Image (cartoon, rainbow, N blue to C red):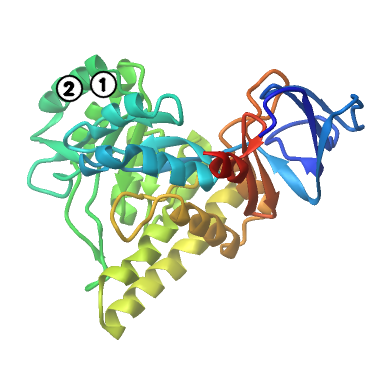
Amino acid sequence: MNNTGYTTIKADYIFNPASDDPVKRYILVNNGIIENISDSPPVYNGMRQLDFTGYAISPFFCDYHLHFSERALASSGKIAGTLLQNGINKVFEGGDCHLSGLEMKKLLRDKLEVKTAGYAIYKKGTYGKFIGRGVEGPGEARVLIDKLCEHGVDYIKIINSGIFKPETATVTPGGFEKKELAEIVGYARERGLDIFCHANGAGKIHDAVSAGVSVIIHGLYVSDETLAMMAEKKVGFIPTANAFAGLSGTTKGRAIQMNIDRAVEKHLPAIKKASDRGVKVLPGTDSGPHFIPYGKAYRSELRLFKNAGLPVERILSSACADQITEGMRADFLILDGLEIKKVFISGECLEDMDDDS
C-alpha cells in the first residue's frame, strides 16, 4: 500500500456532472488527497503512475432510496463494505418503524454519508407499518413531523399509495385524501424539509405532485400529464425499476411473471419520458428486502435506465453523489461505461486495501 508520496492516475477523461471544464485526464494524489486535476501529466521523481487508458474516472454514486431495518444494524460494517465496493458512498434511507436509519447514520458516519427520513408517515389502516408510523390525519402527522425534526432527520417521507401487487397487477390501498396530503406536505415545508413521497397509480402520483412534494418514489403508472407537471414544478423521480423487476424472485407462476414483466415494460418508457422532459430521474434501489440486495441492485437499476433509452452520460450525471475537485479526499471510481472496474478510497484501490487487511 502506498501511504506516502505522489500518485498520478490517468484515464481517457474525468467525468464530472454538470461541469463546464474542458476534458481533463489526470489526477494527482498526495497522501490520500487530490492535489491537482489537469489535462497534462504531472511529473515528480519516484511518483507512482496508474494508467487506466480506455476508462473514465468518476465520482462515487448515490443510492437515492433504500432501507435499513433493525436487523441491518448488526451487519452495518458488511453493508457499508458492499455499498462501497459497488461505488456507493451516499444513501437516502427511506424509513423504518424503529428509526434504524438514524442509528445506522451514526454507525456509518466514517464510511458513508447517510441521509434518513427516520420513519415514513402513512395513513392508518393502509400500507406502511413496516417502514413507518400511521396517522389518522394532518393533526397527528404534524406531531410526528415535529418529533422527526427533534430526532434530526434529513427529510420527510410520506406514503401516498399502496404497493404493486403482481398477482393482480394492481396497486393496493394507501395514502391520504388530497386535502389531507396538501396540509401534511405544507407543514413539512414550513419545517424546512424536503418531502419524498411513495406513490403508485396515476391518481395518487398526481395528487402528490399537486400537493408540492419534492420527489416521487416508485411512480408506477404515472401519467404523461403528471410528468409534465413534475417537470414544471421540478419534482424529482426515483423510479426503482429494478425493485419491480425483482418481484420475480418472490412469486411463482407464469401469469404473475407476465404481470411483473408488463409493469416493468410500462415503467421504462415513463422513465425515458420523464428524463426527456427535464425531470431529474434519480437511481434508487429500495434495497433492504432480501430480494433487493445492497449494491448489486444499484448496478441493475443503472442498466435498466440504459434499457429505458437514457444516454450513459445522463445516467452518470444523476448517479454521481458529488464532483471530483482538488483538495477533496481521493475517493473515485474507474468506469467502463456504467460498469465499475476499480474503486479508490483515499487514493488506494479498494482491492489492494482488502489484500493488505
Q: Position of residue 259 (x, y in %)?
A: 32, 75
The amino acid on which the numbered mark 1 sits, given as a three-letter code, is: Tyr
Q: In the image, 160: left or right of 143?
A: right
Q: Which residue is mark 2?
A: 142
Secondary structure under the numbered disc 2 in the rendered image: helix
Q: Amino acid at mark 2?
A: Arg
**Residue at 21% across, 43% down:** 71
Relative to 54, say whether 147 is above or below.
above
Q: Which mark is residue 187?
A: 1
* Image coords of residue 325 (percent x, y): 70, 24
| Vertical arrangement, residue 263 with respect to residue 33, above or below | below
Q: Is residue 137 left or right of residue 207?
A: left
Residue 155 can be seen in this image: no
- Residue 133 in view of the camera: yes
Proximity of marks 2 and 1: CB atoms separated by less than 8 Å: yes
Viewer-closest of 25 and 122: 25
